[in-house]
Image (cartoon, rainbow, N blue to C red):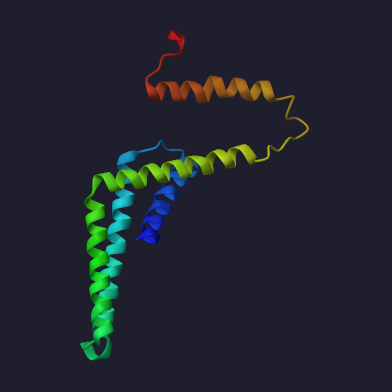
């Protein structure tokens, strides 16, 4: 189950990173909970399919080992569905994935080289003014913050 939990955590972590860096969206716990649950349920379906395949070997009459494997796959599928329905378990996955994603994003931002062109310093003040005048104003408006009151 550790490998399964790691896979689910990685799926959620990747969803966070893509959401923030590529799509420029805010962290949305509801969406990410759904991502975790969906991944758990997908993995449960894969276990059901594995049990079906094992059960169909040898003309649908598996040997003793095959019977144990079918039971194992079905048990794992059941556990995954229980975990998908367990809000506390899903929250734990979400917390761990969020922490890992934030660490990844922060380390990437800290180590990403800034390309300095010959005009970099000359136009720095213009870039800052543009950021404050456009991006910050737009963000404040989206959040319902009046910058004049600050």
Q: How many marks?
A: 0
Q: Residue at x 59, y 38 (%)?
A: 109
Say which of 130 and 143 sits in front: 143
Q: Quadrant of residue 44?
A: bottom left
Quadrant in the picture for the N terminus: bottom left
One can see residue 21 in this view: yes
> Relative to 147, is 7 above or below?
below
Say which of 82 and 19 sits in front: 82
Q: Quadrant of residue 112?
A: top right
Q: Residue at x 31, y 63 (%)?
A: 43
Horizontal side, residue 116 vs residue 76: left or right: right
Q: Position of residue 6 (x, y in %)?
A: 41, 56
Q: Quadrant of residue 50?
A: bottom left
Q: Position of residue 23 (x, y in %)?
A: 46, 42
Q: Position of residue 39 (x, y in %)?
A: 33, 56
One can see residue 23 in this view: no
Horizontal side, residue 29 vs residue 98: left or right: left
Q: Residue at x 65, y 22 (%)?
A: 126
Q: Residue at x 41, y 46 (%)?
A: 97
Q: Position of residue 106 (x, y in %)?
A: 55, 38
């Amino acid at each position: 189950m550790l490998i399964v939990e790691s896979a689910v955590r990685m799926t959620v972590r990747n969803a966070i990173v893509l959401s923030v860096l590529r799509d420029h969206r805010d962290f949305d716990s509801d969406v990410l909970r759904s991502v975790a649950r969906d991944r758990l349920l997908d993995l449960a379906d894969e276990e059901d399919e594995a049990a079906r395949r094992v059960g169909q070997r040898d003309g649908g009459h598996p040997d003793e080992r095959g019977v144990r494997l079918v039971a194992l796959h079905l048990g794992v599928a059941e556990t995954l569905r229980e975990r998908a329905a367990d809000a506390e378990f899903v929250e734990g996955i979400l917390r761990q994935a969020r922490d890992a994603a934030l660490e990844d994003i922060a380390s990437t931002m800290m180590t990403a080289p800034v390309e300095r062109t010959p005009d970099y310093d000359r136009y720095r003040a213009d870039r800052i003014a543009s950021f404050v005048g456009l991006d910050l104003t737009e963000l404040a408006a989206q959040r319902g913050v009046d910058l004049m009151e600050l």
